[in-house]
Amino acid sequence: MSSIQKSNSLTDFDVVVVGAGFSGLYMLHRLREAGFSTRVFEAGNNVGGTWYWNRYPGARCDVESIYYNYTFSKDLLNEWRWSAKYAEQPEILSYINYVADKFDLRRDVQFNTRVQSAQFDDKKNRWDVQLNNGEKVSAQYFITAVGCLSASNVPKFKGLENFKGEWHHTGHWPHEGVDFQGKRVGIIGTGSSGIQAIPVIAKEAKHLTVFQRTPQYSSPARNTPNDPEYLKNIRKNYREIRTKMRHSITGIPEEPRNISVFDESPEERRKVFEEAWQKGGLLNLTYTYNDLSITPEANAIVAEFIRSKIRETVKKPEVAEKLLPKFFYGTKRTIIDTDYFETYNRDNVLLVDVKEAPIQEITATGVKTAEDDYELDMIVFATGFDAMTGPLFKMDIRGKDGVSLKEKWAGGSHTRTYLGLGTAGFPNMFMLTGPESPSVLSNMMVSIEQHVEWVFDCISYMRDQNQAVIEVKEESENTWSKHCRDIADQTLFTKTDSWYMGANIEGKARGFQIYLGGVGTYRKICDEVAEKGYEGFILK
Ligand code: N01
């Protein structure tokens, strides 16, 4: 393996990693420790990825903080104390910065630099990587650590360029913050970002208009400060907790009750749902019964329970009615909130249903729908992301014979990967938490560590075996992609238009892009592939 070789126009590395979020930083740490020359390129001016960009008010992680951290370092686990059950964005960003300092990671990260293109050179068996500052580098391995939700989506509303006020997308929030005081603010979108931001903005702004297209299911987070004794206990038992997380379904050390909703009486169910609602948290409702995401009739029961809670919370019946979700519960990302539905009881908050009266244009002074004009000083776009493939397609990635990834996965053809880690025709390229891995339907930290460790072992194996190229076999990706789709088709996920399906982006190929077999099963499959000398790949 080469060490860093410098020449005038080209810098050669063993590995180039794109992105300095949780996955890119850990990848760098592992590779560097084993002597691989590694360079990380990061568009932002510091580490953090998702948590660097998403600084909107109310941003916090909906996975419990004690489970949403690295577990590879015992020291790190012992040193860091999360202040609350659900950590806020600034605290998570501080944590990532702490990690970057502790392991001296920044010296191998080039900030303010975007990878524009990466092209595999079949003759040299190396990737040529073009950066936006005009520099070119090359690497034996090209690893994308670009996250699943980093290509923000601002819908092409007619007239946005005429708007005289400020506007911001939640995923590109100004670092200096935004002052809502005395302002008439409009927010478009009621997904996880919108639902976190709305209660906070409503408290600060003079007036808030919420433009809602699809009402969402959301349940209370019930965030609380972390008790020091509780944290001490968690640290003491972390080995066991970590094993459970790694072999669980979603990367959280809890499993659903193995019981159908129809095995209990309506009274018993109501009691079970009520307990879960009072307890709060991301999976408590989902985990009450094992058929909620599989059977429409079972799903209808939990959906109706949540609708009853919305009716109870929102005082004006006509507003409550507009907030009632109708799609299958859980088939868009499950959301937990702090005072979301309560916010609609405030006098300074107006809910506008833009499914009924769509937004026609953004004017100089606000938003015009089919029914009315809304005067605004500021618009917040909580309109989501071009998920999964979007971050990859922001780069022009070309494999063998100059074929681009975008072309390969374009049009009606489905994203095809093997284990979500690689794709045929793109040798020596690995995707961390890529499409068709558990990614966004798991605790990302568990999935990130698993991917990084697998890729690291694979690259080390290649070095030990004196092999230069590893490539996915076409039949492996066909089988894996079909397997992913088959599992998804057994659930209700594919029955709803969601970003999981690529349905939120105009013209995007539809297809469920996440492996739903569970992180434990996925880990087992990946481990077996490695044990069999990277079965399903061609090594040479
Ligand atoms: O984006 P979204 P998000 N006109 O796509 C609406 C993660 N996350 O940023 O549903 C009007 O969910 C759109 O309406 P509809 C999490 O995985 C995690 O909120 O398409 N409205 C929807 O209401 C999450 O799922 C946390 O009809 C338009 C909203 O905009 C993912 O990120 C926190 C529109 C977009 O919702 C994305 O969440 C935040 C239009 N033209 C995010 N276009 C955690 O807590 C879109 N919308 C960990």
Image (spheres, rainbow, N blue to C red):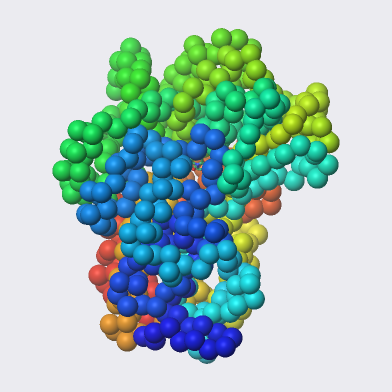
In the rendered image, which quarter is residue 323 located in? top right
Compare residues 531 and 474 and report the one nearer the observer.
Answer: 531
Residue at x 54%, y 79% (from the top left corner): 137
**Rendered view: 123 above or below 169:** below
Residue at x 26%, y 72% (from the top left corner): 532
Compare residues 42 and 397 and report the one nearer the observer.
Answer: 42
Examine the rendering and report whether any part of residue 447 can be seen. Answer: no
Task: Specify the quadrant that holds the C terminus.
Answer: bottom left
In the rendered image, which quarter is residue 28 located in? bottom left
Q: Residue furthest left?
A: 236
Q: Position of residue 232 (x, y in %)?
A: 19, 39
**Rendered view: 83 above or below 322:** below
* Numbered disc total: 0
Residue at x 17%, y 46% (from the top left corner): 240
In the rendered image, which quarter is residue 279 located in? top left
Q: Position of residue 452 (x, y in %)?
A: 36, 63
Examine the rendering and report whether any part of residue 391 can be seen. Answer: yes
- On screen, residue 303 versus residue 104, left or right, reads right
Q: Quadrant of ligand 1?
A: top right
Q: Position of residue 447 (x, y in %)?
A: 36, 53
Residue at x 55%, y 28% (from the top left corner): 200
- On screen, residue 430 versus residue 495, left or right, reads left
- On screen, residue 286 versus residue 376, left or right, reads left
**Rendered view: 528 above or below 470:** above
Compare residues 425 and 468 and report the one nearer the observer.
Answer: 468
Compare residues 371 and 25 and report the one nearer the observer.
Answer: 25
Task: Specify the quadrant that holds the N terminus.
Answer: bottom left
Q: Position of residue 278 (x, y in %)?
A: 35, 20
- On screen, residue 169 versus residue 137, left or right, reads right
